[in-house]
Amino acid sequence: MSQDDFIIEQIPVGPMQNFAYLVGWRPTGDAVLVDPAWSVDGLLERVDGLELNLQGALITHYHPDHCGGSFASHQIEGVAELLAARPCRIYCNRLEADGLKKVTGISENDMRRVDGGDTLDVGDIEVEFLHTPGHTPGSQCFRIKHTLVAGDTLFIHGCGRVDLPGSDADDMFRSLRRLSELPDETVVLPGHHYSSQPSATLGYTKSKNPYLRIQEIDMWRSLMGV
């Protein structure tokens, strides 16, 4: 297996410094998009430019800047527009599915509800779904070879907000502790470009990110103000 057969591209999208991701396997042409929002046509152009066949879309959580829908007074492109242009399966955590339907207007038939520990094969690449509640009840990350697509659970120098409806600071603490146990060489790919670099190894992230250094929940609650 050649490393060149495996594709994972970080794609900046939208005015909120979001990242979408393209994951593909060249020998079979299979591909998925992660958090396709803001620029659906542009994302599909990249899929087509690499001569890949879109198999599905993986959603980290149901906030509109990651999946589309109504946000304040704005309507953001996302999975509804993706399905209209390129019918495929939308993968979301089972606890996030109702929120995703409400925000985007897609149907149950468009989705596949997944649990932590489930996997999806993209060609010969295995995507492992990691349930990481905290930012939202059904937030999930994707472990793909030596990379972690982390959504709004983990940033290079921070973590997702826990003061929003459905957020839970204690759940976030436990999710970050679990992620910190992954190998240090794991490359963290966040959902937003909120630091000076778009990605980093988990080892680097643990050395710089104060939210990963706290190991006692009482200290964590104090840091988060809860």
Image: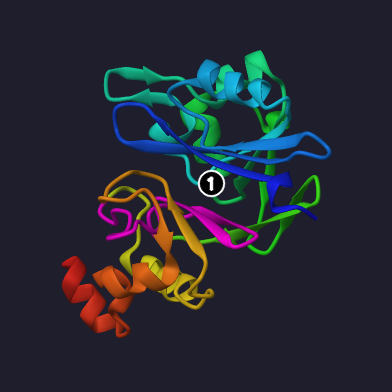
Disc 1 crowd, CA 10 A, few/some/many (<14, 14-19, 20+): many
Residue 155, can we see it? Answer: yes
174 relative to 207 in the view: left or right: right
Picture residue at 53% right of the left edge, 54% below the top = 140
The verdict on residue 72 being magenta is no
Quarter containing the C terminus: bottom left
Residue 216, quarter of picture? bottom left
Q: Quadrant of the N terminus?
A: bottom right
Residue 189 x, y percent position in the rendering = 46, 52
Instruction: Name the side, left or right, on which 11 lies relative to 85.
Output: left
Q: Residue furthest right?
A: 28
Pinpoint residue 175: horizontal percent, then vertical percent.
45, 68
Mark 1, secondary structure of its residue: loop
Q: In terms of depth relative to the viewer, which is nearer, 134 or 52?
A: 52
Q: Main secondary structure of the magenta part?
A: loop
Residue name at image x 56 percent, y 51 percent: 95
Q: Tell me, what colour scheme is on the image?
A: rainbow
- Quarter occupied by residue 107: top right
Q: Would residue 226 be seen by someone viewing this image from the given angle?
A: no
Q: Which residues are magenta?
A: 134-163
Q: Which residue is mark 1?
A: 96
Q: Compared to 95, does 45 lie above or below?
A: above
Could you say which is closer to the camera, residue 24 or residue 84?
24
Q: Is residue 41 above or below residue 213?
A: above
Q: Amino acid at mark 1?
A: Glu
Q: Position of residue 48 (x, y in %)?
A: 67, 21
